[in-house]
Image (cartoon, rainbow, N blue to C red):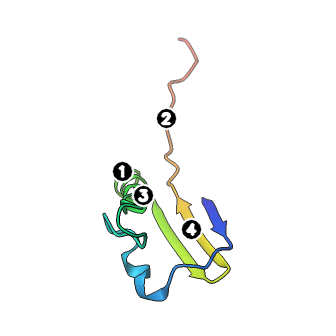
């Protein structure tokens, strides 16, 4: 798990359900593409079967990124 936090103004309650939508941005025309969080979501959740969640209030926004740990079988180094 990785947590990323900032102390900015927070994410307004009215838009929190949309922040992972492709092309959604709160920036003005020509200032943002709205791809960053949608790409992050696809990489973490869809490709790696992890999870991204967040909490936000003014002065404290936190994103938690969780990636699963896979048990990998390694070949034995023993020779017969």
Cα distance in 3D space between marks 3 and 1: 16 Å
Is 28 or 56 nearer to us in this picture? 28
**Residue 76 - label:** none
- Tell me which label, 3 or 4, sits earlier in the chain: 3
Above or below, 66 relative to 71: below
- The residue labelled by disc 1 is 47
CB under 8 Å between discs 3 and 1: no
- The residue labelled by disc 2 is 73
Give residue 55's quadrant in the image.
Answer: bottom right
How far from the left and from the top, in percent, is residue 49?
40, 56
Cα distance in 3D space between marks 3 and 2: 34 Å
User: Quarter holding the N terminus?
Assistant: bottom right
- The residue labelled by disc 4 is 63
Which of the two discs, 2 and 4, sits closer to the camera?
A: 4
Q: Residue at left 49%, top 46%?
A: 70
- The residue labelled by disc 3 is 36
How far from the left and from the top, in percent, is residue 10?
58, 79
Which of the two discs, 3 and 4, sits closer to the camera?
A: 3
Give residue 28's quadrant in the image.
Answer: bottom left
Cα distance in 3D space between marks 2 and 4: 32 Å
Is 51 or 42 nearer to us in this picture? 42
Q: Is residue 42 left or right of residue 52?
A: left
Cα distance in 3D space between marks 1 and 4: 18 Å
Element assignment for label 4: strand
Residue furthest toward the left? 22
- Tell me which label, 2 or 4, sits earlier in the chain: 4
- Tell me which label, 1 or 4, sits earlier in the chain: 1
CB under 8 Å between discs 2 and 1: no
How far from the left and from the top, in percent, is residue 68?
50, 54
């Amino acid at each position: 798990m990785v947590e990323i936090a900032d102390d900015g103004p927070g994410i307004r309650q009215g838009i929190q359900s949309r922040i992972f939508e492709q092309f959604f941005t709160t920036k003005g025309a020509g200032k943002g593409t709205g791809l960053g969080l949608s790409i992050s979501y696809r990489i973490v959740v869809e490709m790696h079967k992890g999870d991204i969640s967040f909490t936000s209030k003014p002065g404290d926004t936190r994103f938690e990124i969780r990636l699963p740990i896979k048990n990998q079988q390694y070949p034995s180094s023993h020779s017969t």
